Structure formats: C-alpha cells, structure tokens
Image: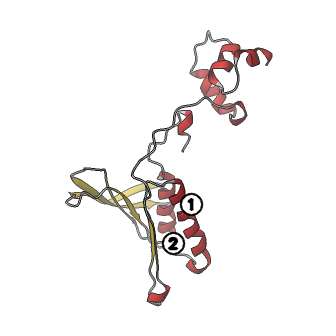
C-alpha cells in the first residue's frame, strides 16, 4: 500500500491495512464492531461511525454513521477496537509496535488502554505523545530501481509508454541508475 514514492498511491490513508486487520481480529475474537471518530483540522463536525464486517463475504456493514458538532476543534482519527487475546504474553510486543509507530510518525499521538475486570492493578494505559505538528511533504516520485521490479511492474511500465519507444529510451527513462550508456550496454 505504501509505495507512494513510485506513484502507487494508497486511497485509504497510511494505516488503512492495519485498521482493517484490527477490525477483522476484533470481529473474529470478540464479535464487537469497531468505533471510529475522525475530524480534519478546523472542521466544524466530527464524524463518528461504527463498522462491522462479514468475514465470510468480506463485506463491510456501517452500523452507525453520524456527524456531530466539533465544539472543541478536535482533529485526528481515533479507532477503538475490543480484542480478545493473551495480554500477558503479547503486551510487550504491542507496546513495542506502538512505540515504533510513534517514532516513525512524530506528528501522530498513539494511545492504548487495556482494561480488565480482574483488578485495576492489571489495567494498563500508555500514551505516545505527538512530538511535531508538522506533517511531512508528500514524497517525491522516483523511478523504479531495476532490482526491485517484477514482471508485473515491467508490463505496467511498458503499457504506459508509446509503442514507438525504443528499448534504450525505455530503460533510461523508466529506471533509476540506468543512463543511456548503461542501457546501450544492456
């Protein structure tokens, strides 16, 4: 999904696949749908929805979708999932994953909350605060490196050029680190 440097852009946002996997895992382990709350900066409304999924048919179900006034000028995306699992075994891995996400995404805040009915002492909360308000520029598009393409990508690149394009021109224009001299050698 994240091949933005190669003009393959994702449509669902940076965490689209992770959110879908969380939804599927929540559905499989507890059956409880996902709650989503989102608003852009300076938006007069906050959108809230409850999503479910039919695992067998791979079809979504929007159980609730509403826009509410955004009196506090809140912005961001909040995804709430209820997942069953062995917290004792996987706590360190989940926290490490969120820590890594916070490092590579300094403009986002991540929070995790684990509640248990057993005792308040076993409950857990952690926040990885936003360290920057600056969102990075969209990456500049670059050419593919020859060692990182497969047959499908090559077919797509060929179909996008004029039929009159020579192999020498194709190689030197479409690939990183192949100039005309190197293309002629190939």
Toward the top, the furthest residue is: 164
What is the quadrant of residue 93 in the picture? bottom right
> Which type of secondary structure does the marked residue at label 2 adopt?
helix
Please give the name of the residue rendered at 76% of the width and 14% of the height, measured from the top-left corner.
184
In depth, the one of 62 and 21 nearer the eye is 21
Toward the right, the furthest residue is: 185
* Label whose residue precedes the other's in the sequence (1 or 2): 2
CA distance for labels 1 and 2:
25 Å
Residue 45 percent coordinates (x, y):
23, 54
In depth, the one of 55 and 121 nearer the eye is 121
**Can residue 56 be seen by looking at this rendering?**
no
**Can residue 114 be seen by looking at this rendering?**
yes
Residue at image mark 1: 100
In depth, the one of 134 and 54 nearer the eye is 134
Callout 1: 10 Å neighbours few (<14), some, many (20+)?
few
What is the quadrant of residue 163 in the picture? top right
Please give the name of the residue rendered at 39% of the width and 52% of the height, measured from the top-left corner.
133
Label count reads 2
The disc at residue 3 is: none
Residue 35 percent coordinates (x, y):
36, 64
> Which type of secondary structure does the marked residue at label 1 adopt?
helix
In depth, the one of 80 and 156 nearer the eye is 80
Toward the bottom, the furthest residue is: 119
Up the image or down, 21 lies above or below 90; here it is above
Residue 6 percent coordinates (x, y):
57, 34
Up the image or down, 149 lies above or below 90; here it is above
The disc at residue 29 is: 2
- Asked whether the beta carbons under mark 1 and mark 2 sit within 8 Å of each other, the answer is no
Please give the name of the residue rendered at 46% of the width and 83% of the height, measured from the top-left corner.
123
């Amino acid at each position: 999904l994240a091949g933005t440097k190669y003009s393959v852009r994702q449509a669902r946002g940076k965490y689209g696949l992770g959110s879908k996997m969380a939804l599927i895992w929540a559905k499989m382990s507890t059956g409880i749908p996902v709650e989503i709350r989102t608003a852009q900066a300076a938006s007069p409304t906050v959108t809230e929805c409850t999503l479910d999924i039919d695992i067998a048919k791979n079809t979504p179900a929007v159980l609730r979708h509403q826009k509410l006034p955004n009196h506090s000028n809140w912005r961001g995306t909040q995804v709430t999932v209820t997942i069953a699992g062995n917290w004792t075994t996987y706590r360190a891995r989940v926290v490490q994953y969120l820590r890594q996400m916070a490092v590579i995404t300094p403009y986002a805040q991540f929070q995790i909350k684990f509640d248990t009915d057993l005792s308040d002492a076993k409950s857990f909360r952690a926040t990885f605060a936003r360290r920057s308000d600056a969102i990075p520029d969209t990456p500049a598009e670059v050419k593919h490196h020859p060692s990182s393409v497969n047959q499908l990508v090559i077919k797509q690149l060929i179909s996008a050029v004029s039929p009159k394009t020579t192999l020498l021109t194709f190689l030197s224009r479409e690939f990183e680190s192949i100039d005309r001299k190197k293309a002629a050698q190939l």
